[in-house]
Amino acid sequence: MDQVIEFVRNHALLTGGFVVVLAALVYTEVMRVLRGVKELSPAQAVLWINDPDAVVIDVSPVADFNKGHIVEARNLPASRLAKPDAEILKLKDKKLLLVCKTGATAVPAATSLLKMGAGDVAVLKGGMAQWRSDQFPVTTK
C-alpha cells in the first residue's frame, strides 16, 4: 500500500488522468444501461435480422449508405426519426435494428424510437465498421 501512495505522489498527473478516464468509462457504461437500448453484436444481429418481422434501419447519411449497407436495410436518416412520418410510425410495431457507421448515431435514434412507442429496438454494436470487420455481407444495391 505504501508503494501505491508513493506512486500517486510521484505521478500525480498520470494518476489524475487515469481517474478521469476511469470516470468517463463508468459514466458511459451507466448511461448506456439507463437508455434501455439493446446492443447486439453482428452475430446476434444476424439472428435478429432473420426474424421475418425484423426491419434493418440504417440511419447513416445517404453517401455512407450507398458505400455499403446490410442487405435489405432501409436508409432513414436520423433527422427523419426525430419527427416521425406515417412510414416510420408503421415500423414501430416491428423488430427494429438500427445501424450507422460506428453505432454512435444509432443509439440516440433508437432512443427516439423508444420514446415514440416502438417496442423492440436494438442497435448494431460497433455499427457497419464492426459488421465489415467481422466479414458479414454488405451490399450497395
Image (cartoon, rainbow, N blue to C red):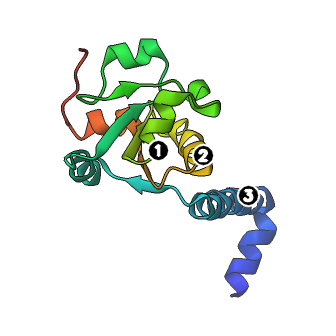
Can you say which quadrant of the picture contains the C terminus?
top left
Q: Does any portion of residue 59 appear in the rendered image?
A: no
Helix, strand or loop status at disc 1? loop
Please give left or right for residue 53 compared with residue 2 in the image.
Answer: left
Distance, label 3 to label 1, CA atoms, is: 39 Å
Tell me the mark number nearer the camera, choosing from 2 and 3.
Answer: 2
Where's residue 54, x and y in %? Answer: 30, 45
Mark 2 or mark 3, which has the lower sequence index?
A: 3
Q: Are marks 2 and 1 in contact (CB under 8 Å)?
A: yes
Say which residue label 3 marks.
Answer: 20
Q: Residue at x 22, y 21 (%)?
A: 139
Helix, strand or loop status at disc 3? helix
- Residue 136: image quadrant is top left
Q: Residues within 10 Å of mark 1 (few under 14, many from 20)?
A: some
Q: Residue at x 36, y 26 (%)?
A: 74
Distance, label 2 to label 3, CA atoms, is: 35 Å
Please give left or right for residue 60 compared with residue 78 in the image.
Answer: left
Tell me the mark number nearer the camera, choosing from 3 and 1.
Answer: 1
Say which residue label 1 marks.
Answer: 92
Q: Residues within 10 Å of mark 3 (few under 14, many from 20)?
A: few
Where's residue 65, x and y in %? Answer: 38, 19
Up-down relation of residue 87 to residue 95 (above or below): above
Please give left or right for residue 18 compared with residue 116 in the image.
Answer: right
Mark 3 or mark 1, which has the lower sequence index?
A: 3
Q: Does any portion of residue 19 appear in the rendered image?
A: yes
Toward the bottom, the furthest residue is: 1
Where's residue 70, x and y in %? Answer: 27, 30
Where's residue 44, x and y in %? Answer: 27, 54
Say which residue label 2 marks.
Answer: 116
Q: Residue at x 30, y 38 (%)?
A: 131
What type is the residue that disc 2 sits on? Met
Mark 2 or mark 1, which has the lower sequence index?
A: 1
